[in-house]
Amino acid sequence: MGANTLSEVGISQDIDGRSYCDRTAETMPREALAELQFERLRKTLRNAWDNVELHRRRMVQAGVVPQEVRTLDDLRRIPFTSKADLRDHYPFGLLARPLTAISRLHASSGTTGKATVVGYTKADIETWADLMARSLHAAGARAGDVIHNAYGYGLFTGGLGAHYGAERLGATVVPMSGGSTERQIALIMDLGANILCATPSYALAMAEVAEQLGVDLRKSALRVGVFGAEPWSSAMRCEIEERLGLKAIDIYGLSEIMGPGVACECAAQAGLHGWEDHFLFEVLDPETQAPVPEGDAGELVITTLTKQALPMLRYRTRDITRITTAPCDCGRTHLRILRITGRSDDMLIIRGVNVYPSQIEAVLIGRAMISPHYQLVVERRGSLDHVTIEVEAQIDVDEEAFPSIARDVARHVKSMVGISTDVVVKLPGEIPRSQGKAVRVRDLRPKD
Ligand code: DLL
């Protein structure tokens, strides 16, 4: 069960100007947190051993049984789990409970092959609602707020995850889902939304449509945006904050682990607090799988500590990030994930230079005469990969200026990211707008 009862959450505890959804859990001293993690890890390993054939087999192969895990460091002896394991055991092979005990299924979008299916018991849904309420609260949402939820409803975890969290917080939720952008804007204004939940790219698409309609969202009641589900740069954060007139907060999660609410920024906007009473976070070198020193970049690997239906042992997220356990201004003791740079699968190697789309985004956004919509087209030329950056001119820019804009963008990308690119300037509106996760890369390389 989750840490809170219904009556406890939504009552903010303002102490010294600090406010928590669950003060005890969020400010737990790190030693106590480690003890709790260990106790919960033992239970999780038991659950996985007793109920999931794959986990048991892997542990046997690795020569480790749950009873022999005596410290948190012993976690290193536990084998990894990957997305391929979920696919290979599609649809229910990794569930630790019979289908009769599963109250909800979600699935990942499955852009690369078969979808992966994830399941939740009633208690798992409760825990998720608690953690999502905790995340929304950390972001600055409060009971009584109107939360406009533009994350997609359905198999994607964004819509229902944010919805249950908003209700648990004691807020009023507007279950919009993605799309019908003009209607979204009208409802934000009419219903007096205080909080916007959306992907950052869709938030920007909303800002653009609002401007075209002559609606000034900066004059709306929106105070906070809770944006996630895709990588976004700090330049993008500034652009969104400026155009929507709100504080833009980063939220992280993935369906295999739970959905949104695994980690979320607080008002300090200085990294996403990973909720360590429910998850164990490691950052490993993706090649050697050795832990990297705190603060260095590596792959985020997550172990669930309270999931019943789908316990995940050392799940390799492929997300590249850094973490810090340094104290945060907000008083929360849980570690901070310092922005997800991108997925290791999305990393491009251009003439030996490793590049994530978000690094190029950071150069593009805020540049004069172009709008913050872009796509990267990756091709193979001979034996080398090549990137063409498609950017869009702002509405009032003369087409004669396009070649000089292209040269300017290419020069800045070269000097700030270190790669040579072609740049194509498109007319306003030519780059597809997202309603959920933006497609940033068109990969035209032959599949090997
Ligand atoms: O995207 C869950 C979610 C919904 C998170 C709404 C936040 C808000 P999946 O569809 O399974 O789940 O995709 C998970 O999205 O492994 C990351 O690569 C990426 N991702 C999620 N949040 C962030 C973020 C949801 N804040 C995958 N920054 C993850 C960067 C993110 N990437």
Image: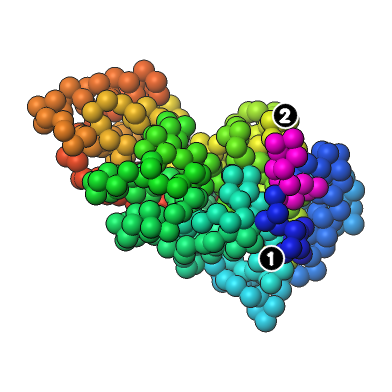
Point 33% across, 57% down: residue? 186
User: Which three-letter amino acid code belongs to the residue tagged 2?
Assistant: Ala
For marks 1 and 2 on the same chain, the one whose residue lies earlier in the sequence: 1
Compared with 234, 309 (above or below) is: below
Q: Quadrant of residue 373?
A: top left
User: Which three-letter amino acid code belongs to the residue tagged 1?
Assistant: Glu
Q: Which mark is residue 126?
A: 1
Of residues 30 and 246, the one drawn nearer to the viewer in this rendering: 246
Q: CA distance from mark 1 to mark 2?
A: 30 Å
Callout 1–callout 2 Cβ contact below 8 Å: no
Secondary structure under the numbered disc 2 in the rendered image: loop
Compared with 280, 87 (above or below) is: below
From the Cβ of disc 1, is ligand 1 less than 8 Å away?
Answer: no
Is 40 on the left-hand or right-hand side of 377? right
Q: Quadrant of residue 167?
A: bottom right
Residue 87: percent from left, percent from top: 55, 63
Secondary structure under the numbered disc 1 in the rendered image: helix
Q: Residue furthest left?
A: 400
Is residue 48 shown to the viewer in this render? no
Q: Is residue 286 part of the magenta span, yes or no?
A: no
Residue underneath mark 2:
326
Q: Which residues are magenta?
A: 13-25
Point 81% across, 54% down: residue? 41
Point 55% across, 58% down: residue? 162
Q: Which mark is residue 265?
A: none
